[in-house]
Image (cartoon, rainbow, N blue to C red):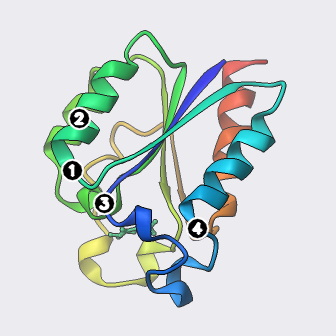
């Protein structure tokens, strides 16, 4: 199996940005631990962009190339029909991921444009959510 881990805006600042909410691990730390967790079970490719259109391009490029996507779209979760449409054009499994428990935060974080397309939604597990999401995808995709 091949899995794309896609992180959106401001997640490049992971570990430095609001560590009381998002923790002290950097994005590089998280990407390395997902790749290590997948070792011998799946091929993992990690990408990050601050740009909505680039995220759309990356999701389009994933068509036919990946069996699943783990996406933390950051703030675009709450604004982007374009990312929803791109995910709707992807045939594989989709996990929507949030490091924080968005439901315990500001009301504008409670709605996601992506959840109607997501096979699973993970929120509030911290960066462990990436590993949990990978295990879920490998379970539903079959090894
Ligand atoms: C986030 C939650 C979003 O509301 C926020 O805009 C982010 C990160 C999370 O991982 O908890 O950038 O997706």
- In terms of depth relative to the viewer, which is nearer, 18 or 138? 18
Could you tell me which residue is drawn at 55 percent across and 60 percent down?
27
Mark closest to the chain's N terminus, 2 or 4: 4
How many other residues sit within 10 Å of disc 3, few (<14), some (14-19) or many (≥20)? some
How many other residues sit within 10 Å of disc 4, few (<14), some (14-19) or many (≥20)? some
Secondary structure state at the residue bearing disc 2 = helix
Q: x, y percentage for residue 99?
A: 53, 67
Q: x, y percentage for residue 69?
A: 49, 33
Residue 79, labelled with which disc?
Answer: none
Which is in the foreground here, disc 3 or disc 4?
A: 4
Q: CA distance from mark 2 to mark 3?
A: 13 Å
The residue tagged 4 is 26
Label 3 residue near ligand 1, CB within 8 Å: yes
* 83 sits to left or right of 130: left
- In terms of depth relative to the viewer, which is nearer, 116 or 27? 27
Residue 51, labelled with which disc?
Answer: 1
Q: CA distance from mark 3 to mark 4?
A: 14 Å
């Amino acid at each position: 199996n091949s899995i794309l881990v896609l992180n959106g805006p401001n997640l490049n600042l992971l570990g430095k940005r609001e560590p009381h909410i998002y923790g002290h691990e950097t994005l590089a730390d998280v990407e390395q631990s997902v790749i290590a967790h997948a070792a011998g079970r799946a091929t993992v490719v990690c990408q990050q962009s601050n740009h909505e259109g680039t995220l759309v391009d990356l999701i389009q490029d994933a068509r036919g190339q990946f069996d699943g996507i783990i996406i933390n779209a950051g703030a675009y979760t709450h604004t982007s029909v374009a990312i929803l449409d791109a995910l709707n054009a992807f045939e594989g499994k989709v996990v929507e991921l949030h490091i924080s428990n968005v439901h315990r935060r500001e009301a504008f974080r409670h709605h996601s444009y992506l959840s109607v397309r997501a096979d699973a939604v993970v929120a509030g597990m911290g960066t462990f959510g990436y590993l949990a999401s990978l295990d879920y995808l490998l379970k539903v995709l079959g090894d």
